Image (tube, grey):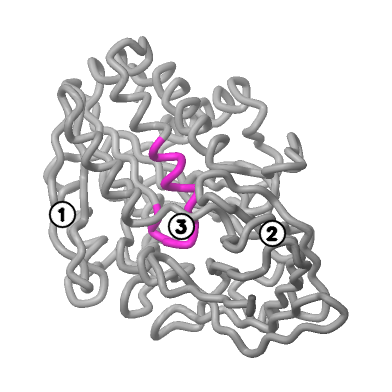
Amino acid sequence: MTLSISSAFDAGNIRVLSTDCSDSVWKAELEIVPDKDSDFYQWFYFRVAGAAAQQVDLVIANCAGAAYPGGWPHYNARVSEDRENWYMTETEYADGRLTIRVEPESNNLWVAYFAPYSMERHHDLIAWAAMQPGVAQKELGLTLDGQPLDMLTLGEGAKQVWLYARQHPGETMAEWWMEGAIERLCDVEDSVARLLRQKATFHIVPNMNPDGSRRGHLRTNAIGVNLNREWHEPSMERSPEVFLVREEMDRTGVDFAMDVHGDEAIPAVFIAGFEGIPSLKPGKVALYNRYRDLLAARTPDFQTVKGYPVAPAGKGNLSMSTAQLAERYGAVSMTLEMPFKDNDDLPDPDCGWSPARSMQLGRDCLATLAEIIDEI
């Protein structure tokens, strides 16, 4: 059979430059396609067909110019033959080129930067959650590509908790986290869920960027806008996703917020806060620090040593959601980051950081919130 490489599907991204076979090894020269109207690129997702029991070297040639070149060293691509179970495969980075070596057992192998979370799976998640007791689903509006922007609401308590993910669509671990968190909150026999739903009302946007997700973007929406730089002044023309969510936040208020992401370079799970905002209150920072430390005590997948530098006093970036929500609503807000690489503190040689671990972290984050919910 002739080797075939394609990405013409939901979230797919690759450009084939050439393929050839020598010494019984197929070699393909590839490029990642940048986000539309943007220089950002790093997400890839494609299918290799016709290569059963053959060695294939997949060489992505334009990695030096990617958004985060520091994400390539010590990184391993993910592969799957059933699109359900994803494993790390041999991957090398040198001279701006990423070489992914595979030997598929079948004639179809999917290769991705991280385990994908398709828009079809997103719609399945929304449909399932909307049918659970006490859950309301709302379409906040439509994106620039005409896709629905979905929100789930559940709980009866006075505390207003916002959870939102995938402002950067290529960070698919964020929606795997959402799936774990939503499943726990919807479990009527789970004591943590019952307590949280009694104390708080949850507003959940599992995917802030449907257009970028379907298009196979790393970081931007349909017109190349980075949504996490729009929170100070969103518009329906540039960033309807942020405009619609912030409008709903204005209606409900925000007491606690978590913005869920993935980080390309840092091989660890960590959070970033709002220390640089103009109206910083010591009590809010103390509660943020308490949440961070409790989460570190609860799960060894989370740590507090590696992470982003803390913004100096008065220098918080209010175009980013975490700082904007803390300033605008007085919220305890944070950005949660998970790795594209493995978690170096607790490595898994087969799967690395994975959908299952992302989902479990979602459950653990809720259990930690339950410990401080009365203090928010």
In this rendering, the label closer to the viewer, 2 or 3: 2
Residue assigned mark 3: 316
Sooner in the amino-acid sequence: mark 2 or mark 3: 2
Q: Nearer the viewer, residue 167 or 20?
A: 20
Residue assigned mark 2: 104
Residue at horizontal 64 percent and vertical 82 percent from the top? 30
Q: In the rendered structure, does residue 170 fall within the stretch colored magenta? A: yes
The outermost residue toward the bottom is 17
Residue 182: give its label. Answer: none
128 sits left or right of 175 in the view: left
Residue 56, placed above or below residue 130: below
Residue 194 figure quarter: top left
Q: Which of 363 and 290 is in front in this view?
A: 363
The residues tagged by marks 3 and 1 sit, at their Cα atoms, a distance apart of: 22 Å
Q: Give the range drawn in magenta.
A: 166-179
Give neighbour class at mark 1: few <14, some 14-19, many 20+ (Cα, 10 Å).
few
Residue 211 in the image: state x and y as whole percent: 31, 68
Residue at horizontal 58 percent and vertical 77 percent from the top? 4
Residue at horizontal 70 percent and vertical 51 percent from the top? 88
Residue assigned mark 1: 247
Q: Which of 26 and 212 is in front in this view?
A: 26
In this rendering, the label closer to the viewer, 3 or 1: 1
Residue 274, placed above or below residue 131: below
Q: What residue type is labelled 1?
A: Glu
Residue 135 in the image: state x and y as whole percent: 17, 30
Residue at horizontal 64 percent and vertical 55 percent from the top? 78
The residues tagged by marks 2 and 3 sit, at their Cα atoms, a distance apart of: 48 Å
The residues tagged by marks 1 and 2 sit, at their Cα atoms, a distance apart of: 48 Å
Element carrying mark 1: helix
